[in-house]
Image: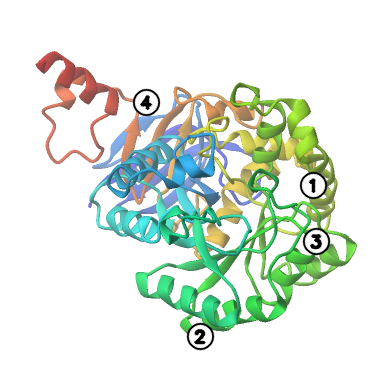
């Protein structure tokens, strides 16, 4: 069995304890020992990685992931990508996430019906590297709401970003279709979205329609997720047991009380980066701060910040991630959420890291083996050059993410670099060839 020992590292173990100097021993897929200095792990028959005082932490979980969003400035540009290219795009993006230390991810809706399922299955089969993944459905939506891209003169389902339904029976058909395809959870758009032309505080689905989704999900043992910016949509999530609440910007006191009373059942992944980046960083794409203000995003950011602070104070679980994959917030920059959690939600840096690690294990339904560096846990480990607790922006810098391990396999290793020419001849290695090395080699061939 493969043994890998990380020695002389500064350990953030994801339990909530302060960091400490120590060693971590991995055998096969799991961590078998964590030693606090001056204690040491046995390095007999192990590959030893001297951390040289660098920061060792659990792999992170992105709780609101859209792998199929293709770094474009509109929903239409995402949807109109042909399925063949779209599949290849997802493969490349999955590797990008893993290289940035995201070893797990929750699919928050795919742009095409089976993209998430195919991606999850291929990662699990070892066909290409990516985070362990729970696959979502397309966004279940209704006529005229977020995800309905059909035109009056071209009513083709393929034009739509989501599965457009009206009435409980159409919800039932959509839910059962996605369950047939093999999703882990169903996603529904319970509120509006300014960029799609429907006010964020509007809730377009009837109680009967939401109840039908919940009934079918529970019948088949599936979880649910919801785009839920409005206060009423958050309440619908609690009333109908929708576990993953995305956004929750306008949650009023009644909604907060309901979430708090059921906080052991729900997770909130607010996607606050979308509000911030769209307000302040999208001018190049026509959304200046003035335009964002007119659309309503600046006001929503202010209200969301206040409501999320209250959620945090009430102990409601808030996790990072959400809506990365637009042009002004491309995939791979997801760790910006951690600093946003500090600046806008009032978390400490330690709490932000725990949201990405310990809470990640919980939302992945594996709290006893993911999100912490403890004996018996799966070896999802990230080695960072520098201390993220002092500077969370380190986790947005690919050069600072020195090593990434998932399930005991090293997928990125800048801690012990291999020459590009040697890497091209490695067979059976426990990490894939680096993209840049392959590109250089291909260029030389031509």
First in sequence: mark 3 vs mark 2: 2
First in sequence: mark 4 vs mark 2: 2
Q: Which residue is mark 4?
A: 415
Q: Which residue is mark 2?
A: 219
First in sequence: mark 3 vs mark 4: 3
Q: Nearer the viewer, mark 3 or mark 1?
A: 3
- Real-space CA distance between mark 3 and mark 2, rounded to the nearest whole angstrom: 27 Å
Residue drawn at x 54%, y 56% is 152
Query: How many labels, in total?
Result: 4
Residue drawn at x 73%, y 55% is 229
Question: In the visual, does 50 lie left or right of 187?
Answer: left
Q: Quadrant of the C terminus?
A: top left
Question: In the visual, does 75 lie left or right of 442?
Answer: right
| Circle number at residue 231 | 3
| Circle number at residue 335 | none
Considering the numbered disc 3 on the image, is that residue within a helix, a strand or a loop? helix
Quick one: 267 or 226, which is closer to the camera?
226
- Real-space CA distance between mark 3 and mark 1, rounded to the nearest whole angstrom: 11 Å
Quick one: 361 or 175, which is closer to the camera?
175
Task: Decide if residue 386 is in sight here.
Answer: yes
User: Disc 3, disc 2: CB below 8 Å?
Assistant: no
For label 1, count other residues whose C-alpha is less than 10 Å away and answer few (under 14), some (14-19) or many (20+).
Answer: many
């Amino acid at each position: 069995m493969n043994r890998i020992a990380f020695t002389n590292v500064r350990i953030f173990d994801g339990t909530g304890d302060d960091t400490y100097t120590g060693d971590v021993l991995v055998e096969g897929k799991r961590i078998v020992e964590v030693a606090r200095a001056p204690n040491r792990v046995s390095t007999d028959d192990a590959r030893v990685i001297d951390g040289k005082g660098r920061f060792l932490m659990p792999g992170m979980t992105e709780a609101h992931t859209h792998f199929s969003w293709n770094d474009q400035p509109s929903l239409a540009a995402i949807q109109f990508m042909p399925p063949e290219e779209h599949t290849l795009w997802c493969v490349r993006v999955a590797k990008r996430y893993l290289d940035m230390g995201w070893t797990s991810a929750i699919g928050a809706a795919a742009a095409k019906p089976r993209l998430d399922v195919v991606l999850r299955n291929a990662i699990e089969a070892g066909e290409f590297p990516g985070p362990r993944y729970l696959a979502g459905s397309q966004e279940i939506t209704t006529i005229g709401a977020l995800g309905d891209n059909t035109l009056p003169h071209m009513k083709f389902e393929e034009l739509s970003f989501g599965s457009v339904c009206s009435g409980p029976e159409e919800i039932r058909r959509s839910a059962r279709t996605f369950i047939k395809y093999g999703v882990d959870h169903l996603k529904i758009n319970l509120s509006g979205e300014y960029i799609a032309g429907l006010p964020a505080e509007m809730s377009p689905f009837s109680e009967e329609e939401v109840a039908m989704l919940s009934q079918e999900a529970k019948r088949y043992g599936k979880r649910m997720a919801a785009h839920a910016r409005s206060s009423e949509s958050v309440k619908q999530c609690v009333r109908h047991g929708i576990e993953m609440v995305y956004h929750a910007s306008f949650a009023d006191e009644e909604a907060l009380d309901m979430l708090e009373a059921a906080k052991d059942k729900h997770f909130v992944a607010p996607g606050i980066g979308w509000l911030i980046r769209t307000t302040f960083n999208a001018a190049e794409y026509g959304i200046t701060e003035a335009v964002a203000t007119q659309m309503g995003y600046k006001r929503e950011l202010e209200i969301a910040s206040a409501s999320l602070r209250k959620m945090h104070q009430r102990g409601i679980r808030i996790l990072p991630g959400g809506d990365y994959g637009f042009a002004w917030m491309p995939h791979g920059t997801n760790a910006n959420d951690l600093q946003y959690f500090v600046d806008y939600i009032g978390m400490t840096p330690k709490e932000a890291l725990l949201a990405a690690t310990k809470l990640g294990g919980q939302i992945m339904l594996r709290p006893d083996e993911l999100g912490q560096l403890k004996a018996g846990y799966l070896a999802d480990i990230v080695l960072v050059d520098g201390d993220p607790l002092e500077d969370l922006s380190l986790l947005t810098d690919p050069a600072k993410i020195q090593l990434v391990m998932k399930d005991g396999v090293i997928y990125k290793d800048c801690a012990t670099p291999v020459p590009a020419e040697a890497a091209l001849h490695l067979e059976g290695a426990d990490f894939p060839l680096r993209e840049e090395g392959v590109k250089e080699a291909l260029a030389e061939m031509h």
